[in-house]
Amino acid sequence: MHFLVTNDDGVFAAGLLALAQEFRKLGEVSVLAPDHNWSASGHVKTLSRPLRVKAFTLADGTTALGSDGAPSDCVALAMLGVIEKPIDMVVSGINPNANIGHDLTYSGTVTAAMEAAISGIPAIAVSLDAPEYFSGPLDYATAATVTRKIAEKLLSDPLPDHALLNVNVPYLKESELKGYRISRQGQRIYRDELVRREDPRGRPYYWIGGEAPTGVAESGTDFGDLAEGYVSITPVQLDLTAHKLISQLKKWTFDG
């Protein structure tokens, strides 16, 4: 098996290294990730400028490729031939903070996996629910092991094309996890605030600030299951159609 490991935090992120090392237990691993942080970048496809790719050496001495493109660009580059060997699965992460609810539309971690799903390649996005403003190095060992186990299940029981798994892991030791749950997307509560300041020349600029987001801790959702100490696994499809609304909209009439 050949795995592509990527992320949105940059090629030197500790979570990416932990994931790459763990997946070498399953097969060959190639790394192609952004050369700098692209958090909250969403699903980007760069068409207006050339993309650069160069080799880097990771902390364990292995070689990785880094691009100045977005996470989704990195996956596209790999699949289009920058990495010559066919890719069997794309694994994106490990993000240091949870990606739940509406986060999925913002997350470079998740949209990198979406880029793989568009091409029908199995994909997992994985995030660690580390405490906000945690100081010091994070321990990604549990999340890496959990992701490998989920990948083994996915290989033996594949999803349909154009679907992926979004995985969120509590910040616990593996022995402390309550287990695994299949979750639906929950309700994220954002507490954004607009901060207005002035530069040295008196011109205004703006910063989107505010407190860290929370969520509705409903059991069966990604936020709720994670809060209860379970690994949350959410199947995500690329079809965004609100199917339940089609019958309602078909009742609309338009003059002419």
Image (cartoon, rainbow, N blue to C red):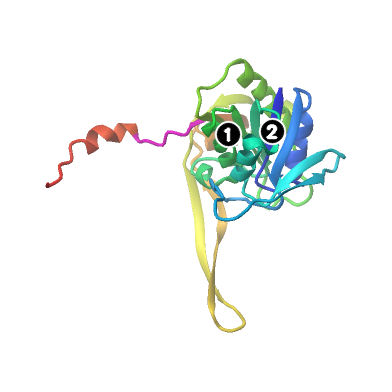
Image quadrant containing the N terminus? top right
Disc nearer the start of the sequence (2/1): 2
Residue reaching furthest to the right: 61
Residue at image location 62% in from the left, 49% down from the top: 70
Q: Is residue 71 above or below residue 219?
A: below
The answer to whether one can see residue 233 in this image is yes
Q: Secondary structure at mark 2?
A: strand
Q: How many marks?
A: 2
Q: Is residue 239 magenta?
A: yes
Task: Tell me: 37 left or right of 27.
Answer: left
Residue reaching furthest to the left: 256
Residue at image location 59% in from the left, 43% down from the top: 72
Location of residue 25 by image quarter: top right
**Majority secondary structure in the magenta region:** loop
Q: Amino acid at mark 2?
A: Leu
Q: Which mark is residue 4?
A: 2
Residue reaching furthest to the bottom: 201
Q: Amino acid at mark 1?
A: Ala
Q: Nearer the viewer, residue 137 or 81?
A: 81
Residue at image location 47% in from the left, 41% down from the top: 187
Report x, y in % for residue 65.
Answer: 75, 43
Location of residue 100 by image quarter: top right
Q: Secondary structure at mark 1?
A: helix
Mark 2 and mark 1 residues within 8 Å of each other at the beta carbon: yes
Range covered by the magenta-colored residues: 236-242
The residue indicated by pointer 1 is 116
Q: Is residue 154 above or below residue 236?
A: above
